[in-house]
Image (cartoon, coloured by chain):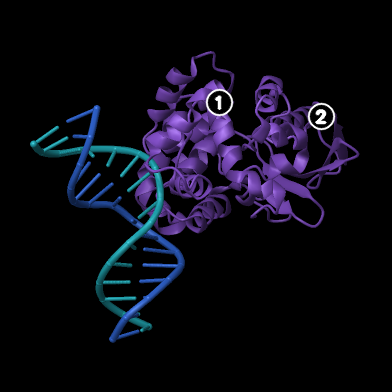
Chain colours: A purple, B cyan, C blue
Amino acid sequence: MKMHFSVPPRFQFLPTVYSHGWCTLPPFRIDKERGALGMVIHKSGGRPLRFEISQHNGDLCVDILSRRSLASWQRKLVRSTVRSCLRLDEDLSTFYEAANRIGRYRWISRIGAGRMLRSATVYEDVIKMICTTNCSWGLTQVMVRNLCEKLGMRDGDGESSFPAPEALASVSEKFLRKEVRSGYRSPYLLEFSRRIVRKEIQPELWRESSLPASELFEEVRSVKGVGPYAAGNILKLLGHYDHLGIDSWCRKRFFEIHRSQKRRNDKTIERYYEGHGRWRGLFFWLDLTKQWYQKQFPF
DNA sequence: GCGTCCAGGTCTACC
DNA sequence: GGTAGACCTGGACGC
């Protein structure tokens, strides 16, 4: 079964898919040869749905792999998930206008970069972001893969979804340390998922929140295990680009590009982008990853 | 194969 | 408010 989507002006599928490392983390799966992004989603009470997204003649095509037909609510779920993950409803026109006013950023709107791939839920993005902290990218991949394989729901072909908060909340810290390899992050993952199950925190509301970015940042920071780096990047996935979310890779990459900078600290980086207002986090990320679009995506 | 060292963000205790 | 040390894992390195 196939579904088709129209896309906003200047939307480009592959620059969105490859916008950052999320596309390599399950339940996403990239097929480089066919230029397709696969994913598995699961809503409580139903079975996992697996589908694959690709772009043909401009429009998006979603190929449902785990079913011959879908109920109406399942079609709606797939549609809203694809729109959300690919940021199809995010209006970047003012960002592109800002980019076009600066010569070195004109490439951004020309190729339709700037939409950052996100997971099916905010909860999933936060858990994954905690798994990126204080470790190599390889270890992040191990942790996320283990979470999906050991706690997710499998579809008929054995592909796993990301575990629901209830599934994650039900295991022990020892299990996470031993089976997921999440180490000292394990109590953070447990506390966050258990707060969701107890309805003490509702991260899914953050995407539609009317809070100013600074207050939303503090709310995200209230999650144990989420510091300035993680919160800054979670905010980007919520559509707020006021924070840079600097980690060791960003720091290294920035000073590779800007060799002339004498003071090599985060304040230098912050100062460099402060003139870009609410888009500074997006300019920062696209500056660092420009070569991906010019040469080859690293994934 | 084994032991040691290091890198990577965040938390907590302390000043 | 700033700083030091602990947290845990995997990879690099030397033996």
Query: A56 above or below A138?
Result: above
Query: A236 above or below C14?
Result: above
Residue that mark 1 sits on: A204
Q: Is residue A241 left or right of residue B2?
A: right
Please tell me if label 2 and label 1 are on a single chain: yes
- Would you say the residues marked 2 and 1 are in contact, meaning their CB atoms lie under 8 Å apart? no
Q: Is residue A217 left or right of residue A17?
A: left
- CA gap, disc 2 to disc 1? 24 Å
**Going from the N terminus, do you reach mark 2 or mark 1 first?**
2
Query: A11 above or below A23?
Result: above
**Mark 2 crowd level (few <14, some 14–19, many ≥20, 10 Å Cα):** some
Q: Chain of mark 1?
A: A
Residue that mark 2 sits on: A7
Tag on residue A216?
A: none
Q: Is residue A56 left or right of residue A111?
A: right
* Mark 2: secondary structure: loop
x and y percent of residue A170 in the render? 45, 42
**Mark 1 crowd level (few <14, some 14–19, many ≥20, 10 Å Cα):** some
Residue sitting at x 85%, y 29%: A6
Q: The C terminus of chain A lies in which quarter of the figure?
A: bottom right
Is A94 or A187 nearer to us in this picture?
Answer: A94
Is A170 or A283 nearer to us in this picture?
Answer: A283
Is A237 or A52 nearer to us in this picture?
Answer: A237
Q: Amino acid at mark 2?
A: Val
Residue sitting at x 75%, y 55%: A32
Residue at the right extreme? A57
Q: Is residue A86 left or right of residue A5?
A: left
